[in-house]
Image (spheres, rainbow, N blue to C red):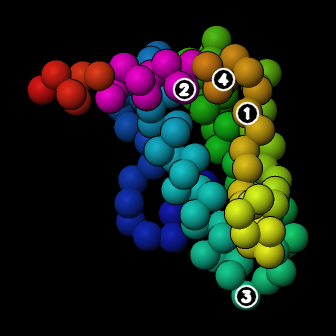
Amino acid sequence: MNSVNNESWGFLHPECHGQNALMFFSWDLAKTIEQQFKLHAESTLAVQLHEAQKAVDRLLNQYVQIQANPDAFEGQSIRLRLEQDEANPETPVLALRTSPRLEALILQVQAQEQASRSIN
């Protein structure tokens, strides 16, 4: 995965393993999707979605390859799709369908991170 800018990726961080890998992954996921929509801004929405999906698949595979947290990432998936916003039907909304196990682990780690921030 090449970065458009010089920001570092979470999967390159030396602490990217175990529970930490889930937080790094959620940051990388957001960055990956944002980058793909910017890179393909001149393309149709279908192309943007397709390119973002390919990048998300590569990112998930990267976390599997480095064995950041095998129990969390192996065999998991994230599917991107466009849904209609009920309040504004003309504006599609990007929805992520994450496999249940991965979603639960990410939400758990994010809640722990938020709780530790509120304590400090």
- Amino acid carrying label 1: it is Thr
Badge 4 vs badge 2, beta-carbon distance below 8 Å: yes
Q: Is residue 107 magenta?
A: yes
Disc with the residue nearer the chain's start (3 vs 2): 3
Which residue is disc 1 drawn over?
Answer: 98
Identify the residue at the far right of this view: 46
- Secondary element under disc 1, as helix, strand or loop, is strand
In the rendering, which numbered label is found on residue 82?
A: none
Q: CA distance from mark 1 to mark 4?
A: 7 Å
Q: CA distance from mark 2 to mark 1?
A: 10 Å
Indicate the quadrant containing the C terminus: top left, top right, bottom left or bottom right.
top left
Which residue is disc 2 drawn over?
Answer: 106
Badge 4 vs badge 3, beta-carbon distance below 8 Å: no
| Segment tinted magenta in the rendering | 105-114
Disc with the residue nearer the chain's start (2 vs 1): 1
Q: CA distance from mark 3 to mark 1?
A: 27 Å
